[in-house]
Amino acid sequence: MRTLFLNSISLHQPSPTAFMLDLDGTLVDTLGDFVAVLNRVMADLSLPAVARDFVEHTIGQGSEHLIRSVLAEAGAPQALYGEAWALYQRHYEVLNGEHADVFPGVIEGLQALRALGLPMACLTNKPAAFARELLKRKGLDGFFDRVFGGDDFERKKPDPLPLLKTCEALGSAPATTWMVGDSSNDARAAHAAGCPIALVTYGYNHGRPIREVPAERYIDRLDQLLD
Ligand SMILES: O=C(O)COP(=O)(O)O
Ligand SMILES: [Mg+2]
C-alpha cells in the first residue's frame, strides 16, 4: 500500500511522512449542525433565522467568526456576541453530530491512510472539545494520533501556526506532512507552513469553486488520495 501511494504521488510531489486532516467539510458534513445550533441561538435572542447558504459560505474560520458574521447579517449589534457565544456553546454541546454525516469515502480513505502506518492528526478550527466529541460520536476518533481544535493554539488557520505545531507534535517535517482540507483557509495555511495540500471538492469553500485555490491535489472522495 505504501509503495503504491509513494509511486503515485512522488513523481511531482513530496512523499508523505504524516497527515493532517481538516474536520468540517472534509471528514464530516456538519452544515446541518451549524444551521440547527445557530437557529436555536437566534430564536433565544429573538432574532430572525439564518439562511443555510449564508452559513455554508461562512463556516471554516472558527466559531467566533461565524457567530459575529451571523449577528451582522441579521443586523444585530456585536454587543450581543458574549450572550450569543454562551448560547451557541450550550446548544452545540447537545446537538453536536445530530445533523451531520460522514462524507462518502471518508472511512475507506482513513482506513487506507492508517494502513500506511504514518502519524495522523485531525486539525480543525472547530473548538477542540466539540471536535473530539464529534469524532467520537461518528466513530472516527480511533484514526487519529492527535486532535487539535481552533482553541488549542494562539492563532487559527489560515495562519500557519496550527499546522507547524501539529507537525511538531507528530514529529514530522512540514515539507512532507500533507494537509487535507476543503477550503482556501486550509490551503493558505498549508502554503504558509510549507506543507503540501490536497483539497476535497465536496466541502465548504466560502462559496467559491475549490479548483481556483492552488493545491497539489484535488480529490472527489478521501479514498482517492491513494489512487
Ligand atoms: O470553522 C469551524 O468551526 C470549523 O472549520 P474546519 O473544521 O473546516 O477548520
Ligand atoms: Mg473545513
Image (cartoon, helix red, strand yellow):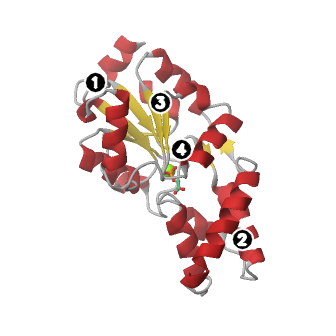
Residue position for label 3: 224
Taking the spot 55% from the left edge, 62% from the top edge, the residue there is 63
Q: Is disc 3 placed on a helix, strand or loop?
A: helix
Q: Is mark 1 within 8 Å of ligand 2?
A: no
Pointers 2 and 4 in contact (C-beta within 8 Å) = no
Res 36 → quadrant: bottom right
Which of disc 3 and disc 4 is earlier in sequence?
4
Task: Please rate how many residues cluster around mark 4, counting C-alpha atoms within 10 Å: few if below 14, some from 14 to 19, many from 20.
Answer: many
176, 221: nearer the viewer: 176
Question: Alpha-carbon distance for marks 4 and 1?
Answer: 23 Å
- The amino acid pointed to by label 4 is Leu
Pointers 3 and 2 in contact (C-beta within 8 Å) = no
Residue position for label 4: 23
Residue 99, image x, y percentages: 74, 51
Residue position for label 1: 15
- Residue 227 appears in the figure: no
Question: Alpha-carbon distance for marks 3 and 1?
Answer: 16 Å
- The amino acid pointed to by label 3 is Gln
Q: Is disc 1 placed on a helix, strand or loop?
A: loop
Which of disc 4 and disc 2 is earlier in sequence?
4
Residue 20, image x, y percentages: 42, 36
Question: Alpha-carbon distance for marks 3 and 2?
Answer: 38 Å
